[in-house]
Image: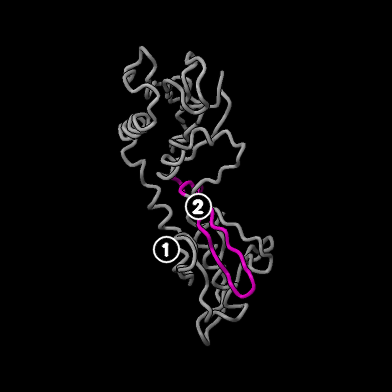
């Protein structure tokens, strides 16, 4: 998983400054009328591995596009000749890999249609997942590296002075109460934002006075060590 697929949201409520690490591993929230609901049996497991899933309407039903690191994607679709079936429970599945910029990159990754190589699996979602995981292992042995990307974002927050928020989910961090002065908070946020952006992570900081985004041509200035000079910090885009 790329760092630009992860966004760190930094917010302030009263005296609390928190940072939430959000990315493909963040559990999806389904609306009642969300067509993705019908496919959550395999969307949730795939996204828990750091794969981004986008639901679109295909030739005759909704399909799921699984975005891959090289720019290609897997399209998971129910069989077009499946007749009538309950939404999300077709008699078979077809998984195609292609690339929007390379028409020659076209391959069948899984096919449980009546005459396909995985016909005996029919519409089984567990077997579909086994087939997709096996295919991903074949084309990219390191595809499960999403956890490392998220852990690095958390490490950068800790280096900036944030601590894990024990009252929230694992990917939530906050500034310690000891950092009471506004200047200290701004400095810690600036360190976090600069470190995250330098490594390609997305950062959102909707609280205006906390956002260390400098004016054009102006550096962000962090407080230096006690008794020392202030330290200018350049931002990476």
Quadrant location of residue 94?
Answer: top left
Residue 8 forms part of the magenta stretch:
yes
Span shown in magenta: 1-25
The front one of 236 and 120 is 120
- Marks 2 and 1, the one that precedes in the sequence: 1
Residue at figure coordinates x 51%, y 85% from the top left: 226
Left or right of residue 206: residue 7: left
Q: Is residue 13 left or right of residue 225?
A: right
Given residues 72 and 128, the one toward you in this image is 128
- Neighbourhood count class around disc 1 (C-alpha, 10 Å): few under 14, some 14–19, many 20 upward: some
Residue identified by numbered label 1: 155
How far apart are the two marked residues, 2 and 1, measured between alpha carbons? 14 Å
Query: What is the quadrant of residue 133 in the picture?
Result: top left
Camera-side residue: 192 or 226?
192
Q: Using the image, determine if residue 198 lies above or below residue 111.
A: below
Residue at disc 2, secondary structure: loop
Q: Which residue is mark 2?
A: 200
Report the side of 13 relative to 163 (left or right): right
x and y percentages locating residue 97 in the rendered image = 43, 25
Color theme of the render: one colour
Nearer to me, 98 or 35 = 35
């Amino acid at each position: 998983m790329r760092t630009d697929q992860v966004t760190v949201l930094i917010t302030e409520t009263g005296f609390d400054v928190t940072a939430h690490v959000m990315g493909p591993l963040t559990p999806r929230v389904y609306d009642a009328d969300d067509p993705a609901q019908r496919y959550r049996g395999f969307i949730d497991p795939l996204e828990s591995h750091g794969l981004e899933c986008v639901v679109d309407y295909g030739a005759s039903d909704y399909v799921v596009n699984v975005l891959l690191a090289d720019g290609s994607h897997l399209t998971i679709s129910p069989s077009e000749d499946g007749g009538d079936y309950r939404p999300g429970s077709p008699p078979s599945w077809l998984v195609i890999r292609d690339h929007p910029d390379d028409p020659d990159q076209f391959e069948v990754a899984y096919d449980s249609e009546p005459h396909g190589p995985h016909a005996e699996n029919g519409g089984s979602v567990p077997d579909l997942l086994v087939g997709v995981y096996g295919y991903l292992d074949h084309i990219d042995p390191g595809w499960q590296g999403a956890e490392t990307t998220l852990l690095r974002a958390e490490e950068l927050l800790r280096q900036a002075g944030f601590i894990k928020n024990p009252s929230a989910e694992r990917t939530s961090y906050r500034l310690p109460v000891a950092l009471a002065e506004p200047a200290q908070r701004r400095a810690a946020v600036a360190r976090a934002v600069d470190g995250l952006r330098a490594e390609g992570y997305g950062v959102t900081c909707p609280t205006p006075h906390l956002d260390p985004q400098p004016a054009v041509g102006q550096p962000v200035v962090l407080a230096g060590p006690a008794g020392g000079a202030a330290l200018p910090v350049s931002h990476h885009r």
